[in-house]
Image (cartoon, rainbow, N blue to C red):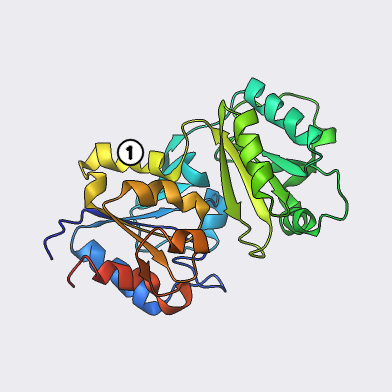
Amino acid sequence: MGNNIGAVVTDLDGTLLTDDKRVGDADLEALYKLGDKGILRIAATGRNLRISEDVLPEDFPLDYLVFSTGCGIYDWKKKQIIHSDGLDWKQTQKVMKQFMAEEFDFTVHQPIPDNYRFYYHRQNPANHHFNEYVERYSSFAEPLEHHEFQIDNACQLLAIIETDTKKYNDLINQLEDVKLVRTTSPLNGKAMWIEVFPRHISKAWGLKYIEKTYGVPFDNMLGIGNDYNDIDFLQEVGHPRVVANAHPDLLKQFPIVASNQSCGVAEAIKTVVDY
């Protein structure tokens, strides 16, 4: 097709993964075919490494996992974390203070590779979205009030609220020295998640490692996503696609393929790669 594709990048939840967290047969076959052709296969996800491994078996056809929205990069074949990042304590304190002033329910996550563990601060007992998150990962959760020491190099903070676009935009202006990422809850598809990372972090930033290491320019990458935290890399790659179940805002911006329930990743791959 003359596209000279060197890498294919896909989001996980709502894109490669079906609603019941499986990978469709056609999508799986397409990933194997990419490997046969020497095309890099990259998953870029907001999931941390541990919960990514819950849905991707050890022998899954993948080369790299950009996890925690770019805070970590994992060599899937060597089973090694090759990069990790985090917030300094002053940044974490500032965000915590702001979230408390907003009366948000939020979490503070430990440094990579233990960022599946977190401390939580709850101000609204009726926030069922937040309660759902804490209950799901209760084995790894500890009340923030029980933690007496500073948290150096925290991977991220996460506030879970009802969707409020104005509040999110206001926070971007108030917290200019960190990166705020809006996404839709992968747990229920309803709540707004506001994730906080180091200022430079994004899925696209994680992909720059691939660009530098393999000499694969963004123009020669296919990217497939479905939600707000995918926009940064969809805007960078030469061949962006969104699945049909993507947020309406993304459907207006990028070419559309089949939904995550109908192997949209395989369809996207076929638009640029012959196999």
Splitting the image into 4 quarters, where does residue 127 fall?
A: bottom right
The x and y percentages for residue 266 are: 33, 72
Q: Is residue 133 above or below residue 67?
A: below
Which residue extends farthest left?
A: 2
Residue farthest to the top, as pictured: 90
Please state which amino acid type lies under the numbered disc 1: Tyr
Q: Which residue is mark 1?
A: 209
Q: Is residue 249 visible?
A: yes
Q: Is residue 47 left or right of residue 92?
A: left
Vertical relation: 32 (above or below) 9: below
Vertical side of 6 occupied by 60: above or below: below
Q: Label 1's element?
A: helix
Location of the N terminus by quadrant is bottom left
| Residue at 78% in and 44% down | 105
Residue 110 visible in the shown view: no
Count the marks: how many?
A: 1
On the rendered structure, is 40 left or right of 74? left
Q: In this orientation, which residue lies closer to the viewer: 119 or 243? A: 243
Q: Locate residue 30: give its quadrant.
A: bottom left
**Image quadrant for the C terminus?**
bottom left
Instruction: Estimate the x, y position of residue 154 in percent, counting from the top left.
Output: 62, 32
Q: Residue 11: x, y in percent?
A: 44, 58
Q: Position of residue 37 (x, y in %)?
A: 18, 63
Few, some or many C-alpha atoms within 10 Å of disc 1 (few <14, some 14-19, many ≥20)? some
